[in-house]
Image (cartoon, rainbow, N blue to C red):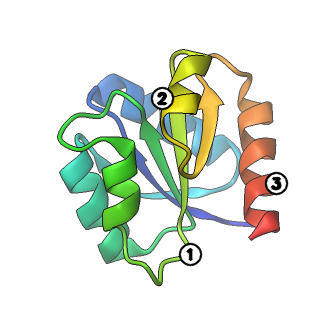
């Protein structure tokens, strides 16, 4: 299954690392965003299967990103969080704790897509 992914993180090095990981899964990174506004624009433009967003992405909070992505979109919002408490603050999309092994991140994303 070749999924299309937009990666959003304020740090170029983190975006590159996420893009490499996504590529290892056989998925395609169609675009990279440095902030929340760019993430929304790219999600609307590319209509990816997954929007992978670092919770610290600036410009917009993750709930606003989720609200601004097209309502008709089937894009799954995946938040990479630093602390479990961040998950409780915004119940949108799927939250994954940073540092979780890549194969587990992939499995969580696939499970969430299968539930849709």
**In 3D space, how far apart are the residues under numbered discs 1 and 2 (Cα atoms)?**
25 Å
Contact flag, marks 1 and 2 (Cβ < 8 Å)? no
Left or right: 62 in relation to 24 = left
The mark lying in front, picked from 1 and 2, is 1
Residue drawn at (81%, 65%) of the image = 115
Residue drawn at (28%, 26%) of the image = 11
Most extreme residue toward the front, as rendered?
A: 89
Within-10-Å neighbours for mark 1: few <14, some 14–19, many 20+: some
Identify the residue position indicated by label 1 in the image. Answer: 74
The mark lying in front, picked from 3 and 2, is 3
N-term mark: 1 or 3: 1
N-term mark: 1 or 2: 2
Q: Position of residue 66 (x, y in %)?
A: 41, 58
Identify the residue position indicated by label 3 in the image. Answer: 111
Identify the residue position indicated by label 2 in the image. Answer: 17
Up the image or down, 55 lies above or below 50; here it is above
Residue 89 numbered mark, or none: none
Q: Position of residue 106 (x, y in %)?
A: 74, 43
Q: Secondary structure at mark 1?
A: loop
Q: Nearer the viewer, residue 74 or 107?
A: 74
Within-10-Å neighbours for mark 2: few <14, some 14–19, many 20+: few
């Amino acid at each position: 299954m070749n999924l299309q992914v937009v990666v959003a993180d304020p740090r170029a090095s983190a975006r590159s690392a996420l893009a490499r990981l996504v590529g290892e899964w056989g998925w395609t990174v169609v675009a990279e965003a440095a902030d929340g506004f760019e993430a929304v624009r790219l999600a609307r433009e590319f209509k990816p299967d997954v929007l992978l967003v670092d919770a610290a992405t600036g410009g917009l909070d993750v709930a606003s990103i989720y609200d601004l992505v097209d309502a008709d979109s089937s894009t799954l919002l995946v938040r990479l969080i630093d602390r479990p408490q961040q998950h409780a603050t915004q119940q949108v999309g799927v939250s994954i704790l940073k540092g979780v092994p890549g194969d587990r991140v992939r499995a969580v994303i696939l499970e969430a897509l299968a539930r849709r």
